[in-house]
Image (spheres, grey):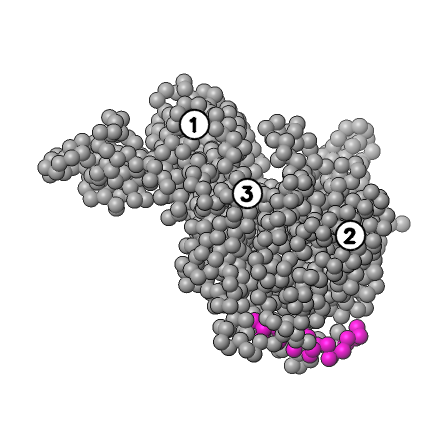
Amino acid sequence: MARRRGWGGGRVPGRPAGAGTVPAGLCQAEGACQRRPAAAVIRGFENGGCAAAGQSESGRRLLGDAQSRPPRRPAAGSPEEPREGAQVACREHGELAFNSDSTSKECLSIHVGQAGVQIGDACWELYCLEHEIQPDGTIPDRKQRDPLEDADTEEQANASFDTFFCETRAGKHVPRALFVDLEPTVVDGIRAGRYRALFHPEQLLSGKEDAANNYARGRYSVGSGVIDLVLERTRKLAKQCSGLQGFLIFRSFGGGTGSGLTSLLVERLSVEFGRKTKLEFSVHPAPRVSTAVVEPYNAVLTTHSTLEHADCTFLVDNEAVYDVCHRKLGVERPSYASINRLLAQAASAVTASLRFQGPLNVDLVEFQTNLVPFPRVHFPVTALAPVVSADRAFHEPLSVADITAACFEPSGHLVRCDPRRGRYMACCLLYRGDVAPREVNAAIAAVKARDSVRFVDWCPTGFKVGINSQPPRATPGGDLAPVRRAVCTLSNSTAVVEAWARLDHRFDLMYAKRAFLHWYLREGMEEGEFSEAREDLAALEQDYREVGQSLSCKDGWREGRR
Amino acid sequence: MSEGRSHILDSGYIITNDTLASDVIGRRVEVNGEYATVRFSGIVPPVAGCWLGVEWDNPERGKHDGSHEGTVYFKCRHPTGGSFVRPNKVNFGIDFLTAVKNRYVLEDGPEEDGKEQIVIIGSKPVETIGFDSVIKQQSQLSKLQDISLRNCAVSCAGEKGGIAKACPNIRKVDLSKNLLSSWDEVIHIADQLRHLEVLNLSENKLQCPSGSASLTGTFSALKVLVLNRTGITWAEVLQCASACPVLEELYLGSNNIIISQRPTDVLQTVKLLDLSSNHLIDESQLFLIAYLPRLEQLILSDIGISSIHFPDAGIGCKTSMFPNLQYLVVNDNQISQWSFINELDKLQSLHALSCIRNPLTEGDKAAQTTRQLIIAKIGQLRTLNKCEILPEERRGAELDYRKAFGNEWKKAGGHQDPDRNRPDEEFLAAHPRYQLLCLTLKIKCPNQLDQKVLEKQLPDSMTIQKVKGLLSRLLKVPVSDLLLAYESPKVSCPAKYKVKLTSPHYDIKFLCKTSLILNGRPYILSSRVTCCLGEST
């Protein structure tokens, strides 16, 4: 089991003893000294060509960190203290970093496969809107456009999107993103699309031969040919970062490229960028609609191989999102474009805290700590509210209480599962826009009063809430109405086991007859890999069942499986 | 209810009887979450003390119609719409600035010491992040641009100039579901907010402004005005709109509006008009707003409309009404006839339509068929029910439409030969676009003199390749030997102009719409196309 020191990895309070990580006491002592060399190695590697001044500056800061501040995070006890201190210190120095590690800032988005690339297209369109970046990467002069804007808010807004955009000397803002697909048509769509001038050609990678919905092709025969190029481009992007925070990977479980190439990629990323976090947005195979017959094979195989590498995977499924589009937005037959726009809203809500940082906003990192109680149990369910169609913009009451309640309805979830049947391990609410704190408290009290929201008994905290003052934006011409406030809930609920059980069942049906297996064997895979993956998934289901049980029967908890 | 409510109740009471001013009649009040209008104030014998007679918004809340023991104190629209309540039970609301402070500024400060507040709900604590900074940021009222005061019992503007002083930068205000009782108060508020762009006044029952002169200049920057559920009348709408020189979006849902007069000199800048759930609107009223020059989106959901007929345009012509209307929403109506859809084809710029939950679309027919028919019947439609219509879908829909009504067309007198093609009026009225969907192609073969001139009606989406295939079957000439050229009857040059048809994937419609530059003058090829057929050498 890989033990990295990423966002959610080694610093989870309440981890069962003997879990295989550094014990709590050691962690504090080792924190500082272990971290430095690791960072230095990566720094040397990343900043090979950078100006010496920058390097020494960051080096000094790093040293300063280790000397003056408490180590990154004590494993147990109050997790708030060091952050608080660091935040105050940062504010004093006028810096915008607010993770206690002031070097970690930037996030790289990697979009793999058709689904990943298309969602990425929608995401970056939305990010640009939110940061008021034009399709060619420039920002119109805020002063000129908006005489009322205060100088300090402007500065803050400008500085904040550094995590996702890289500013060139010419004043262009280039997304820190990489689009990878094994066949050209989808990436060509971006190359010819409205935002074509936003990206550097090197960020758009496409092969000639597609993975044909086959994990084996995506990972072995075709994928292995392009992985070095993908990694090279990733390194190049990483080199532009002063302190890479982690990777956001967008992909689908069902497709060949999304499943196969991603699993290869995250393994290689783990080797090269050891302690960087990897967050995933994954499109889970939908229960009833499917695009490929071998989806269950691909999904099971890729889950098995990325389970140990990804730190947190936000699941969505096409059918649930399709339903939301159909019912709430009144789209007769939602196209991928409408679905992707909704997914982009979810991704934007989750990443808003990373993009609009600065002292006023909340950090995803903190939420992630709460969300992932055990490294394998890292599949939070996303829900989004409000979802209102543009022609009903002013008809529905969208108070804080309304949108909070809507988020806990099963119909608002972007994965088909019923959270009422499971227990929550953690629940994070990310508010955006015009939200007054006291309304949030009242809204949560109302939600908690329902029977349907039950927490596991071993988890000390319940909800974790953040407010981001930037209101959400709607894509012009899209189906969503512009709203003043929105909420996105990320809940790690045992109910998600439903989705896994369904997937495993579909896998079993085919695998019992060894149907379609030859496509995989032909590309050089072995049957053993299938049964191993299936066992791992069974273990995952078991994990979820066990965490859902009450404390008294938790003795059978197995750690360090596989 | 939220915590915010109790604050308002605490500070918003007008408790003693003495403070009741004489102008209390007509004021909007709130009693235990129910909204009402004060109609009477005084003594109701035999019970001692001062009473307020109120008319509830929710008529089931009351007990009588304003009369008590035979004496009529006030009148209600509904027989059980009235009540008498004690003044101390009534919330008369607070002023705008107090409401803003209630929502955005904390007056009691356990949180102000910088620590994050931990709320315990049930047995688990709720961790909050960044709340203190959000509070700090929000409490700087002068920087607020977008405020929402829904359900905050705002009843008046408060001290003159106070708003302009405290929060001058407000651009968007949501004042829905408050206790504003007249436009005068709204004007007092809006006068102080010179950057105001979005104003939401839904669910307030507003009385007319006292003098129209006071309106001018108030909403000089207002772009979006929302007046859902306000009970406003069309005359009042026009009066208010006259003060909004740059208004772009106007929402008037659920108001029982009757459009009574043509807007002249007002609403000329409006791009979006929402009239949904106004059940009294009918076809003829819509014609009164038909000439708004900028109107692009019209939302007519749930108004009970069943038919429309543009009187100024005949079959197959475009109407001059709604010249810029691009997007029309007619969800939840009583549309059951295809003639409605046929009429929509007459709108010049319509390219998006949303038409769901109507008898026409909900019938036993498959939804897919209905969609296809709508696509085929409205030529320039690009989006239907929020789904883009791709060229393949349109082609399929039009071909199916041709096929499905082919027999009917023949029965009605249609014929492939254009000279004998005389479908009756009835068919034309039912299918105005049917004949436009195909082109008449005259096929001449200069090299085969004995061959008569053939005429064929072909769907305009047919590609050149398909035409070739058809001709090779008709004339029994191998495809490779066919050489198609295209002759337009409109081009009257000395030498007959011919375009060689080489690219097989163009459709013939494309050819007809292509304008050619010939001798420096543009020619648009007519829809009657002649194809010259020669044999390749």
Reading the image, the residue beneath label 2 is A238
Q: Earlier in the sequence, mark 3 or mark 1?
A: 3
Reading the image, the residue beneath label 3 is B133
Helix, strand, or loop for circle 2?
A: helix
Residues flagged by tags 3 and 1 on a common chain = yes
Reading the image, the residue beneath label 1 is B189
Say if the magenta span includes residue A333: no
Q: Position of residue B91 (x, y in %)?
A: 30, 37
Relative to A241, residue B346 above or below: above
Which quadrant is the N terminus of chain A positioned in? bottom right
Q: Position of residue B256 (x, y in %)?
A: 36, 37
- The amino acid type of the residue labelled 3 equals Ser
Which quadrant is the C terminus of chain A positioned in? bottom right
Q: Mark 3 to mark 1: distance in Å?
A: 29 Å
Left or right: B452 as drawn, with respect to A554: right
> What are the residue bounds of the magenta stretch?
A521-544
Helix, strand, or loop for circle 3?
A: helix
Q: Residues within 10 Å of mark 1 (few under 14, many from 20)?
A: many
Say if the magenta span includes residue A533: yes
